[in-house]
Image: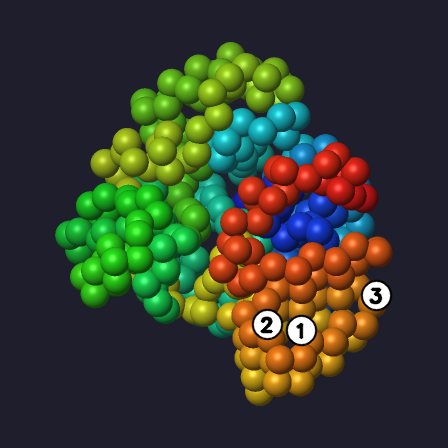
Amino acid sequence: MSRWAVVLAGGVGSRFWPISTPARPKQLLPLATDDPLLVDALTRLAPLVPPERTLILTNAQLVEPIASLAPEIPRENLIAEPRPAGTAAALAWAAHEIVRRGGSDAVMISIHADWAVGDPEGFRLALSRAADAAEQHHALVTVGIVPARPDPGFGYIQPADDVGDGARRVARFIEKPDRVRAEAMVRDGYLWNSGIFVWRAADFLAELSALTPEVAPHLAANADSLEGFFTAVKTPISVDVGVLERSTKVLVMAGDFGWDDVGTWAALRRVRTCDAENNAVRGRVHTLDAQGNVVHSDDNAVVLYGVSDLVVVSRDGLTLVTTIEKAADLKTLFESLPADLRDLP
């Protein structure tokens, strides 16, 4: 059975303003390593799924930049969503395309472009095991991450009955909890909801058809029209809500390979190599008596003296200074900005 990969690479990443912009969003930036996040993702996948069976879902504005970053991916595998319609619609079209090209037995591995992974080999092993389980059980399989900490910024999965080979049924999905509840769930063996999904493309489409009226009829009516399908989906819905939380065929497998969602500036203290004072810096930066800061400078020199837990970002004559805590809510700042700052090139 052939295995295909789907990489979700749309979105702006406003929580990484001011260096993440619509024209240069975070997945195209070198945030975790010296390579852009998308390149990191494709490099991790390459030993498991060849480029000709790797689809990248993005928006029209990013097709050319992605083609330049990833010339090994065939151009027809860069799928530009005409409008945002939620991950249920995006993965529905990807599954539809995979069945068309690879047949109903093809297995689809879905990941996001903006993650950091400390153990790439362990990551690939977890995906391969999940693919085996998807084939064996005709199930929708998600890889839940063994929590490294009680993090209220992530969703959680409660595992239930063991069905063998490390796969368990899913009791329920839990949206982002408060810290006290997150601590209790970690103690009770819950897993982080990573957004790693593996299934036979035909099995996913069957569940979508049965459970997701927000999307399924529009796919059936627009099977030959990407534009028509995305235009017809009027209610954007996530795949978690639209399919997984409604399905009885969902399994979870635990993964422990140094996964992190690079979602905010604060995450860079976990995914970058920090100095002796736990500062995560990139660019020309000098620190003295400074601890736990995140500094990113494209051009200017930045000097920090006697400060802690700050985020300092400098680019093209603009500098952002905030705290680690407030950086988690940077989207609020972004939405308040005047257009000339919000729409930086």
The nearer-to-camera label among 2 and 1 is 2
Disc 3 and disc 1: Cα gap in Å? Answer: 13 Å
Residue 277 place in picture, x, y as percent: 56, 84
Residue type for callout 1: Val
Sequence-wise first label, 3 or 1: 1
Q: Are marks 2 and 1 in contact (CB under 8 Å)?
A: yes
What label sits on residue 293 in the rendered view? 2
Residue type for callout 2: Asn
**Does the rendering let one see residue 131?**
no
With respect to residue 20, does 76 lie above or below? above
Q: Are marks 3 and 1 in contact (CB under 8 Å)?
A: no
With respect to residue 111, does 150 lie above or below? below
Residue type for callout 3: Asp
Q: Mark 3 Cα within 10 Å, few/some/many (few <14, many 20+)?
A: few
Sequence-wise first label, 2 or 3: 2
What label sits on residue 299 in the rendered view? 3
Q: Which residue is mark 1?
A: 281
Left or right of 72, for residue 132? left
Secondary element type, mark 1:
strand
Disc 2 and disc 3: Cα gap in Å? Answer: 18 Å
In front of the other: 205 or 185: 185
Residue at 42% of width from left, 20% of height from top?
Answer: 214
Residue 40 place in picture, x, y as percent: 63, 62
